[in-house]
Each structure stands twice: as C-alpha cells, then as structure tokens.
Image: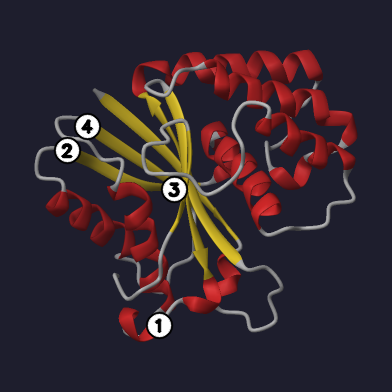
C-alpha cells in the first residue's frame, strides 16, 4: 500500500521561549491512502467553491463567517475510514524535556519527536511519502537524517522521501494545521473568545473526543509522550 503523510506542528516556540504560556507543543500529520489524494483535493476544491472560501485552510482562519466551511472539512475527514485517512499527533510537555538527552540541541530534539510521531505508524511492506511544512533549520540535513533513521528502524517498509513543502500550496498540510490547532486549543485549555472555534472543537468531538488516546486509536490518535529519558 502506498501512503502519503502530511505534517505540521504547533507551538514549536515552547522549546525556545521562556515566556510561552502554553504547556504542550504538538506535531501531527494526516495519513492517506495515496490513491485517494486527488479525490480528497477535488472534494476540498468543491467545498471552497460552495462556501467561497479560497484562502489557506488554517486554525487561525476559523471565523464565524467560515464556520460551516470548516465543519465540512472536518466532516470530510471523518467520512473516510481509518485505512483511507487518519490523523496522529504527538503531545510534548515542553518544560519537562530534558535537553541533555538531545545534546542540548533543541532542533535535534524537535526532530527526534518527529521520529516518534512517524515511526509508530510505519507498517511493514507499505511505501511512504512524507511531506512537512517548510521550516528554517540550522542544520540543513535534518530531513535526510530523519528519513535515514526511519528507514533503518523500518526494514520491511520503504520510506521513499521526506520533503518540505510550503503549506500554502498543500491542502493536506493545511488540514493537518486545522486539526492541530483545535487539539492544541482544547488540550492547552485556551480560553477562546471566537465562537466559531469553540463550535468547531465541539463538532470534532461529536465524532471523536479530543484527549490523549491509547495506541490502538487509529482515526484520531493523540500520543502524550512520557518524558523519561527514552529519546
């Protein structure tokens, strides 16, 4: 089976800022059967036309005037079964990260958490293409190293590539941003004044509750990592 993964992150500044108010940083991705890519993109395009919403799909862009459009995007995600389209996020309590385990390199630590996100859902005999939002890395080899490590730990799967793409050009990375934003808002206990965002979180939870999940949750998986020096 050929699988494509579209990834993004939210609140990565929690690793570097001492003034950040939020507790958890999230990295997440939407996993799809590659055969469905064009179909999903076509359905999103139809929804854009229906609701006249042509801007980037992002959590920050959820407003009352666009609430119905964003609910349709969520409904589209849940209309596919877990083998066709699913989402996984890793939840990291930033203040508990022991940076000495990462050579005091916060960029290195960030990509180790990316590995933890991806590795658990790499299955034998499948082929994977992984796409991440463009990020300015101090070390330009980060994605190549991540690919090599995933290949070495998944001998019976094939990691074809990990490629950085601008999210404004990739609708499935945008959808990952939407779910990450909702999950982060709920689990960081943010006080939301935007009624559309409150309603969208409730709408997602009409399908699946937003909470840390067990490993066997295969549609909306939220992995709260235990930071006990395992990385």
Instruction: Say which residue appears at 55% left-offset and 16% top-offset.
Output: 79
Q: Secondary structure at mark 4?
A: strand
Looking at the rendered image, the quarter that the C terminus falls into is: bottom left
Q: Secondary structure at mark 2?
A: strand
In the displayed structure, 206 sits above or below 188; it is above
Residue 203 or residue 137, whichever sits in front: 203
Q: Secondary structure at mark 3?
A: strand
Q: Give the percent coordinates (x, y) of residue 59.
A: 71, 44
Q: Give the percent coordinates (x, y) of residue 58.
A: 68, 42
* Residue wearing tag 2: 158
* Residue wearing tag 3: 132
**Mark 4 crowdedness (10 Å alpha carbons): few <14, some 14-19, many ≥20:** some
Report the colour scheme.
secondary structure
Distance Cα–Cα, label 3 vs label 2: 18 Å
* Residue wearing tag 1: 99
Q: Which mark is residue 70?
A: none
Distance Cα–Cα, label 3 vs label 1: 24 Å
Residue 203 or residue 153, whichever sits in front: 203
Instruction: Say which residue appears at 68% left-offset and 68% top-offset.
Output: 22
Q: How many marks?
A: 4
Distance Cα–Cα, label 4 vs label 3: 17 Å
* Dot 4 and dot 3 residues touching (CB under 8 Å): no
Question: Which tag is nearer the camera, tag 2 or tag 1?
Answer: 1
* Residue wearing tag 4: 127
**Mark 2 crowdedness (10 Å alpha carbons): few <14, some 14-19, many ≥20:** some
Looking at the image, is mark 2 or mark 4 earlier in the sequence? 4
* Dot 2 and dot 4 residues touching (CB under 8 Å): yes
Q: Which of the 4 quarters of the picture holds residue 148?
A: bottom left
Looking at the image, is mark 3 or mark 1 earlier in the sequence? 1
């Amino acid at each position: 089976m050929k699988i494509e993964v579209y990834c993004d992150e939210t609140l990565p500044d929690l690793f570097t800022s001492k003034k950040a108010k939020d507790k958890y940083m999230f990295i997440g991705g939407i996993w799809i059967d590659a055969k469905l890519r064009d179909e999903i993109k076509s359905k999103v395009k139809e929804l854009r036309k229906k609701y006249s919403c042509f801007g980037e799909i992002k959590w920050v862009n959820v407003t009352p005037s666009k609430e119905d459009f964003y609910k349709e995007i969520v409904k589209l995600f849940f209309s596919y079964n877990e083998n066709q389209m699913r989402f996984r996020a890793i939840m990291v309590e930033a203040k508990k990260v022991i940076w000495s385990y990462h050579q005091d390199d916060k960029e290195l630590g960030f990509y180790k958490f990316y590995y933890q996100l991806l590795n658990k859902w790499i299955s034998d005999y499948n082929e994977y293409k992984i796409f991440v939002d463009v990020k300015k890395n101090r070390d330009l080899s980060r994605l190549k190293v991540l690919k090599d490590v995933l290949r070495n730990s998944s001998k019976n799967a094939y990691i074809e590539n990990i490629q950085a793409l601008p999210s404004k050009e990739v609708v499935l990375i945008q959808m990952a941003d939407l779910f990450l934003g909702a999950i982060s808002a709920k689990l960081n206990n943010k006080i939301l004044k935007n009624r559309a965002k409150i309603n969208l979180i409730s709408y997602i939870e009409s399908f699946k509750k937003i909470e840390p999940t067990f490993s066997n949750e295969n549609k909306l998986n939220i992995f709260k990592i235990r930071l006990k020096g395992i990385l």
